[in-house]
Image (cartoon, rainbow, N blue to C red):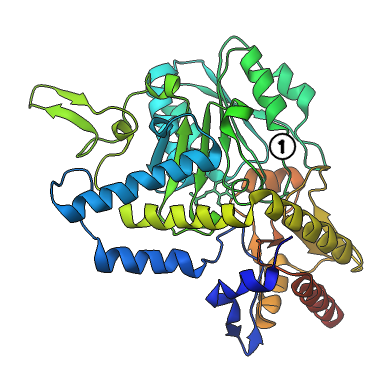
Amino acid sequence: MIDIQKIREDFPILQRKVYGKPLVYLDNAATTQKPRVVVDSITEEYYSVNANVHRGVHFLSQQATELHEGSRKTVRDFINAQSTNEIIFTRGTTESINLLAFSFGEEFIKPGDEIMISAMEHHSNIVPWQLLSSRKGAVLKIIPISDQGEILMDEYQKLFTDRTKLVSITHVSNVLGTINPVREIINIAHQHDVPVLLDGAQAIPHIKVDVQELDVDFYAFSSHKVYGPTGIGVLYGKEKWLEKLPPYQGGGEMIQSVTFEKTTFNELPFKFEAGTPDYVGTTAFAKALDYVSAIGIEAIAQYEHELTQYATRQLKQIEGLRIYGEAADKGGAISFLVGDIHHFDLGTLLDRLGIAVRTGHHCAQPLMQRLGITGTVRASLGLYNTKEEIDILVAGIQRITNMF
Ligand code: PLP
């Protein structure tokens, strides 16, 4: 059982008022708010530990390194990776996917090879593959989805050819909320000897992710969507894959030795981490993961599931409201439109009532084209949201629709 009032007290920003109204923060898919332990960790480390990691013999540098590498262990445990060698720190999901697109592309993609993504991807799981395709002459294949917002599994199977080199797909859709059947998606890809990258940006904060159980080859996610600081992300990769991939960026930290003639690269995971990492951020990120673990990701998933069902039921009572994304297995991102009210107008008026939602294409323009719309209003839930806040949202929408 989640003690929601106690949790809310951990997030000072939730006490804020906007336009004189209590803040109702329903934009968690864009970014989550931060508990006090996360923010305190940043201040404390800068005040009492700060020193560059890995290279120093002095006390502070060693302490900072211990914290930074300790965070890597926290991430490893959180997703149940086999080794810290498989945890690469990046700036976020976007950089994780770009890293893989570059390094995997350099090693494995030849002209005519195929990469598969789905019709419900975020731009950050589309554009890096397009860049790779134009660089290497590869072909992007798109797995179609149903009107409910589910992957068409038969179509997916049919897209495999002997040129398929990688499947890259979102674990949970940031627009439709769909939780994709990733176990099955991975099994099918593996039957064709094709590795899979999951974009876990919207999964990690909400559901249990066990990379070994999933048998997923690569997994990308962002700290700021799971109550941690901005500017940190993770690329998980099976060691057997990461060992085969060339570095993404060159610089300090990622080398073993450098002469003007030749450079040899550092071991995993440092081979992929050029330059000074955001070591203060990684410590705070680990605090966020510890915070989530202390509540329990299963308890969070259960609570958010109930909240999503409640929100969906209540929203459906509103005349003229249409929900986009009605998959059987669905997380807490709810996209909708009401009558012919423009999503931007609805979002702006909700904002005046203190309700933070997101409007627009949600960085998924091809999905909007598939749905035949230009955008939606999206309410997305986090572990601190309540039924009362859903009621405020519903009452707000009702008030606005009466005005139109
Ligand atoms: N993938 C999905 C499904 C997302 O929802 C997002 C962010 O909204 C991203 C990728 C990009 O994450 P970031 O901006 O943290 O790199």
In the picture provided, is 324 more to the left or to the right than 58?
right
Q: Against 148, is 317 above or below?
A: below
In the picture provided, is 299 more to the left or to the right than 235?
right
Element type at mark 1: loop
Quadrant in the picture for residue 188 = top right
Find the residue positioned furthest to the bottom: 20
The tally of labels here is 1
Q: Against 163, is 79 above or below?
A: below
- Counting from the top left corner in percent of width and height, residue 234 is at 45, 42
Q: Residue at x 33, y 29 (%)?
A: 268
Find the residue positioned furthest to the top: 162
Name which residue type carries label 1. Asn
Quadrant in the picture for residue 401 = bottom right
Residue 278 visible, this angle: no
The residue that label 1 is drawn on is 180
Q: Against 49, is 217 above or below?
A: above
Q: Residue at x 49, y 45 (%)?
A: 93
- Counting from the top left corner in percent of width and height, residue 355 is at 68, 75
Comparing 66 with 27, the one in front is 66
- Counting from the top left corner in percent of width and height, residue 357 is at 66, 68
Q: Residue at x 67, y 68 (%)?
A: 344
